[in-house]
Image (cartoon, rainbow, N blue to C red):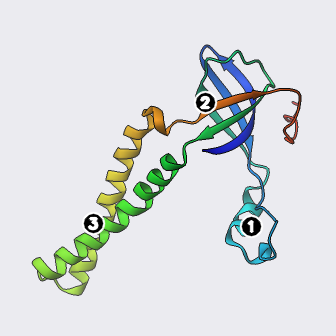
Amino acid sequence: MIEEYGRVIAVKGENVWIETTSKTGCGKCSAEAGCGQGFLAKFNSGKRNHIRIKSELALTLDDQVLIGIPEDALVKSSLLIYGAPLLSFILFVVIADNLLHLSEPGAIAFGLFGLVLGFFLAHICSRWAKGAVNYQPVILKKLSGNPVCMSPAPSA
């Protein structure tokens, strides 16, 4: 289970809005300066994310919670989003070259059509998975006190 701490910012019936804050890279290894994750984290650090989760727990505003998503759901989603377009592109180029005997520009164009088709298929599948229960984050537990080191909500 991949876990993240969050803070309740709204409760509407059985739906709870949780705010999480993007963190910088781990900073625990000597390769922090050359790490791609550390580089990208400089741009996302401190960004607030809002997630709607269905919960049966009795939660109130500013409650600290631990949320999680199954690791296999993340892996499957990543394979779908990145793998489907890539495999579709390769498949269409192979078909264009070996079965249709298209020229190189024709094979590239046919491959790009396959790439777009792969993105479309990934989009359709991700819309289906959006409603699937095992792909949704869940609230694992309500935390007592203030154990989460999150900055307070900006005051208006």
Instruction: Provide residue 126's location: percent of width, then percent of height.
Output: 41, 45
The 10 Å Cα crowd at callout 2, few under 14, some 14 to 19, many 20 or more, is some
Location of residue 103 by image quarter: bottom left
| Tag 2 and tag 1, C-beta contact below 8 Å | no
Q: Which residue is mark 2?
A: 52
Q: Residues within 10 Å of mark 1 (few under 14, many from 20)?
A: some
For the C terminus, the image quarter is: top right
In the picture of the structure, the residue carrying the numbered disc 3 is 113
Looking at the rendered structure, the kind of residue marked 1 is Gly
Q: Residue 51: x and y, percent? A: 63, 35
Q: Residue at x 17, y 76 (%)?
A: 96
Nearest to N terminus: mark 1 or mark 3: 1
The percent coordinates of residue 109 (x first, y second) are: 26, 74
- Under mark 2, the amino acid is Arg
Q: Judging from the image, what secondary structure is the residue with disc 1 in? A: helix
Q: Amino acid at mark 3?
A: Phe
Q: Where is residue 105, by image quadrant?
A: bottom left
Query: Is 73 placed above or below 26 here?
Result: above
Mark 2 and mark 1: Cα distance apart in space: 27 Å
> Compared to 85, does 9 lie above or below?
above
Circle 1 sits on which residue?
38
Seen at 78% across and 58% down, the residue is: 24
Cα–Cα gap, marks 1 and 3: 35 Å
Front one among 55 and 18 = 55
First-in-chain label (2 vs 1):
1
Per the image, label 2 sits on a secondary structure element best described as strand
Disc 3 secondary structure class: helix
Residue 150 position in % (x across, y down): 84, 41
Q: Which mark is residue 114?
A: none
**Foreground residue, 74 or 47?**
74
Residue 41 shown left or right of residue 80 in the figure: right
Which residue is rendered at x = 66% and y = 36% of the image? 67
